[in-house]
Structures are given as structure tokens and as C-alpha cells.
Amino acid sequence: MTDDSKHIDYLIARYLNGEASSEELTMVEHWCAESEENQKYFDDLRLIFERASELETDTQFDVDAAWNRIAPQLRRSKRIDFRQPSWMMWASVAASVAILIGVWVGITRYEMMGKHEQPIELAANSILKKGLLPDNSKVEVEPNSRIIYAEGFGKTNREVTLVGNASFDVHHQSGPAFTVRASGTFIRDIGTAFRVKSDGDTSVVEVYVKTGSVVFYTESNKGIILRQGETGIYNKITKEFTKIEPAKSVDPPAVVKAFNFQETPLSEVINLLSKAYNVPIALSNPKLGRCTISVRFENEDIDTIIDIVAETLSLKVERKNNGYLLTGEECSK
């Protein structure tokens, strides 16, 4: 990384324009997290950047080209390292960066004139619509919903605006993070598949993470991180985020098959066993059904039960047609 690229103003400019590498994104985010003063400085620059960008009608800026033109001016200014600077330095740098961004916008305004990117829309009417975005991410737009993105999607930006509900399966690649705008919130992908529900007639935005994780936030609230199986809800009225963790799976109770036969006729015994184990059981002589048996079984397999019944009543067992046939002499009175 060159000496100029280490300058925090340069990194923030690339970050705000969606051209920062993953390493640069991490550096800026760590720097912002070091202090409230750092975060405020970043927020001030972002506000200036957004207001300046409004003049461009979605024109995509070339940060490096503009930087090469204004970098000599920065070499004459004080540099900011990643330690907390004084208040006076903050004021000085904020003012200089505001001027530089104004120069940058002016340069790119004339360089990029006539090259505006037109928005692209993918809409679903009455049925779900599946699509493949330019960066190979998959999207399912639910009925009466739509997504909008710029022509440069996947190269200069990876931001999608959602109206309604949609599911995303994000393709991993270097460069700008995949981000969804929905009803004043942002969902930034950290490598995942997720669903966003932002119906216009509700007061909440809901995000469910199928795999991976996302950052769910707004411009004024750093939000929450959602991981696999978790659901995040943003209340548009209270401006608060809520996380719902997946319910712990509970094993269903074990099925207990218990039989307590007391002087029960064999015909009734085989009828109950046949229904309980879903297997045919027959008698070679219907009169065998009058035989009675007293025995208890609990969670025994059907083979064992049939063998015990046969042995108790001095009968024989024939296994045929996936079932059982009991044969023998009539029981004595």
C-alpha cells in the first residue's frame, strides 16, 4: 500500500464510494471503533459525501483518478494516524476534506458527463420471480415486490434497493460488500443467504438469515449482527432493533409400546400386535384364538414378542409374506 493510501481521508473516500478493498474496509471500521471522536469525524464526512453525491444523479466516481489530481494538496496537509488526534486537528482536517470532496465532485462532474448509469428493476407481480444479479448472486422477489440496482452493480457497487419482500443468496467476491436498502434500513452481507421482509403497510422490517451472517443497521443506529437461524426486526416507529434467536430443538418423547395381557384371548392379542407394529399376524386354526395368555411386553421388537407368545402357548411360528402365521393344537380347557 502506498504512503498516500494510508491517509485516513483517502481510505474514507474509497469506503464511502464503495471502492475500498476488504482490508481497507476493516481498517476504516476499526479506526471508527477506536473512539466516539473518530466515529463522529467519519459520520461528518459521510454526510458531506452524500450531499455532494446528490448533484451527480447516480454518476459513479473514479476515486483513484480524482485522488491523483488532488493528492499533492494532501501532501501539504497534516496526516491523521490511527491514534486519537486533537480537537483542532479534527476541525482543520474536516474543513480540508470538505473542500477536497468539493473539488473531487467538480472534477468527476465534467469527466463523467453523459455517462450516467440507469437503474435496473426486477419486479414480481402476482407470482414469485427468480433472478440472477450481475455479480452471480441469486434473488427471489416475492409477489408485489421489486428490487432496483444500478448498471454498474457487481463492479463499482453492490447495493440493491428493495420494495417489499425478497430472498438473497449472495455470491462471494472481492470488492464492495453486498448491501440491501429496505425501508430506511441496511442489510450488509458477510457471506450468506437471507430473506428481507419490508412490506410497505407494516411498521417493521424483518430479516431472517438462512446461512452465514449479516449486519442489520440504519444510518443512525449501528444495528445488530444476525447469524444463521436468527431473525432481526427493526421497528420503524421506535427506531429499535430486536433479535430473535432460533428455538432450541426439542426431541419428541419416545414412543413406548407396552402391552399387559392378563388372560387375554390370543385372537385379541394378535389383533393389537398387528395394528401396533403394522404387520400381518394370522392363525392357522381359528380355534387357536380362544387360547388365553398372561404376559407383559414393553418396547420389545415384534419378532421377540411373537416368539414368546408361541413358546408360551406351545405353538410354532412361520414367517411368510412379511408377516407371521401361528400353528399348533387347540388349547386344552
Image: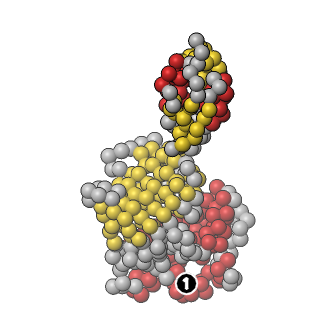
Q: Position of residue 77 (x, y in %)?
A: 64, 78
Residue 312 pos. (x, y %): 66, 24
Q: Residue furthest left?
A: 126
Q: Secondary structure at mark 1?
A: helix
In this view of the protein, which residue sits in the foreground, 308 or 94? Answer: 308
Specify the quadrant of the image occupied by residue 79. Answer: bottom right
278 or 139, which lies in front?
278
Q: Is residue 257 left or right of residue 199?
A: right
How far across and how far down the image is residue 95, in percent?
Answer: 56, 70
Query: Residue at image x 34%, y 72%?
Result: 119
Residue beneath disc 1: 64
Name the image quarter holding the C terminus. top right
From the image, which quarter does the N terminus lie in? bottom right
Residue 53: x and y, percent? 43, 72
Residue at figure coordinates x 43%, y 58% from the top left? 167
In this orientation, which residue lies closer to the viewer: 266 or 232?
Answer: 266
Where residue 51 sits, quadrant-wise, is bottom left
Q: Residue at x 65, y 32 (%)?
A: 307
Would residue 315 be seen by someone viewing this image from the given angle?
yes
Report the residue at 36% width, 44% height from top.
202
Compared to 165, does 243 lie above or below?
above
Label 1, residues with CA under 10 Å away: few <14, some 14-19, many ≥20: some
What amino acid is at disc 1? Asp
Please count the marks in the image.
1
